[in-house]
Image: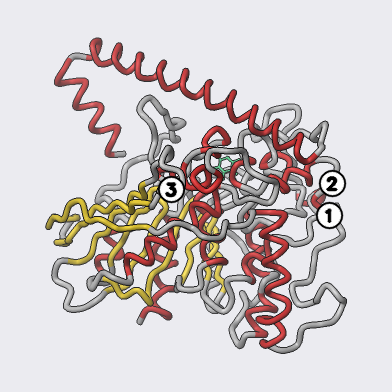
Amino acid sequence: MKNTAFLLSFFVLTGFQAVAQEQDSTRKAFLAAQAVIQKQSEQDHKKMLEQLRITSLRPGPSGNPNAPNAANVDESQATPYTSLPDPLVLKNGKKVTTAKQWWQQRRPEIVEDFDREIYGRVPKNLPNVTWEVTSESKEMNGDFPVITKKLLGHVDNSSHPAIKVDIELTLSTPANATGPVPVMMSYGFRFPAGFRLPTPPATTPPAKPEPTWQQQLLAKGWGYAVLYPTSYQADNGAGLTQGIIGLMNKGQTRKPDDWGALRAWAWGASRALDYFETDKAVDAKKVGIEGLSRYGKATIVTMAYEPRLAIAFVGSSGEGGVKIHRRKFGEQVENVASAAEYHWMAGNFIKYAGPLTPNDLPVDAHELVALCAPRPVFISSGSPQVEGNWVDAKGMFLGGALAGPVYKLLGKKDMGTVEFPPIETALIDGDVAFRQHSGGHTTGPNWPTFLLFADRYFK
Ligand code: GCU
């Protein structure tokens, strides 16, 4: 970890104690700010429950495997639900047999259900975004010379000037490119000062460091971009009256079918794509999207709703991503409906944690993957030993596998199996791909396999 190395050298240079104290006060300030955010999120969550006339919610299980209420990880107990919707059966009970029926009838039905009940509706009349290149520099990334642009997307806030929104994006393309290049855009985490990642398990560092994902892309002559979602929509309920959601609501509370953070983040990715269409260094027809965890959820949502994206690399997206909701394994609907995570979703999603249940959801995650068809989607997970079971690798696999019939209807190939494969099996011959790597909560070890898959489309 670069940051750790940086901090260590800092300690040596300036004296441990002074820095430790400063660190301590930054940490305290961070924790105090977190407490305020949590309280405000709980208040906003409560207001949404009032709008929904819900008086109590079922609590979700714990992510701690040793807790008395630990999430289920026993496969024999994982499937109590009976009502998995068929992506190819219309609401009127008729079977979809042609691509035309899919595009004109069934897909719009599924989109409406996801809009209303799961991720929320994107407002009409979204503001214009004006992109500014704030800096441009030639630099080296490992052995590769790159041109890096830092960009700000200024959001027109004339409808409610009290809320100012800028989208932060960086773009790096090979300096020696002779024409426009494919670009992978990654949703980037940005942590506030004082934030601490959990200590990763000790591992022996490799003798020669592996090339980073950016360097793997550069080796192919492709570029990379990093989009910072929290620059335009906060990752908490307290921020729902700010950012792009707050701007559209003029600082008021959401209605139950208004968009949540995942769709707001996806909106920003679409605006980044608008910019790429104007930048001669980028082949805008070959732009892919990647993200991990909450940004893995954002990745699949972005791909489902943004037809211009060419490929998606969906990392450990778990519940609310490509994991089937109707599986009692790992994280549950109830967890995402809680005050800590509901902001990702439409308010209506909370209903399925009381009085309704996951069985009542009008759609499930395989239909979200199906909305991406016929475009390629790669679903990634880590190992149960290192990453844990919270993300439910098999549930994510099924999200991809059960989207297969829609890919086939559109003339594409499914995963080739609905049997969960052994770890490290690359299912990449179809247009929906899956691989569980043996590492932790990261897409890292799956980049080489993803790039093999992507090669087929970006050649
Ligand atoms: C929590 C949450 C997950 C989410 C993850 C993350 O574990 O329950 O749904 O994906 O955080 O984004 O890191």
- Residue type highlighted by circle 2: Leu
In the rendered image, the vertical position of residue 363 relative to residue 457, given as above or below:
above
Instruction: Give the mark nearer the N terminus: 3 vs 2.
Output: 3
Cα distance, mark 1 to mark 2? 6 Å
Secondary structure under tag 2 reads loop
Q: Quadrant of ligand 1?
A: top right
Task: Please name the residue that numbered disc 1 is placed on.
Answer: 360
Task: Please name the residue that numbered disc 2 is placed on.
Answer: 356
- Residue type highlighted by circle 3: Pro
- Contact between marks 1 and 2 (CB within 8 A): the answer is yes
Q: Quadrant of the N terminus?
A: top left
User: Residue 414: x and y, percent?
Assistant: 62, 78
Secondary structure under tag 1 reads helix
Quarter of the image holding residue 44? top right
In the rendered image, the vertical position of residue 213 relative to residue 52, given as above or below:
below
The residue shown at (31%, 61%) is 224
Cα distance, mark 3 to mark 1? 31 Å
Residue 229 — which label?
3
User: Residue 120: x and y, percent?
Assistant: 64, 54
Count of marks placed on residues: 3
The residue shown at (33%, 49%) is 168
Instruction: Judge left or right: residue 90 versus residue 2.
Output: right
The residue shown at (63%, 48%) is 345
- Contact between marks 3 and 2 (CB within 8 A): the answer is no
In the rendered image, the vertical position of residue 452 relative to residue 319, given as above or below:
below
The residue shown at (52%, 61%) is 302
Instruction: Give the mark nearer the N terminus: 3 vs 1.
Output: 3
Instruction: Judge left or right: residue 9 versus residue 35.
Output: left
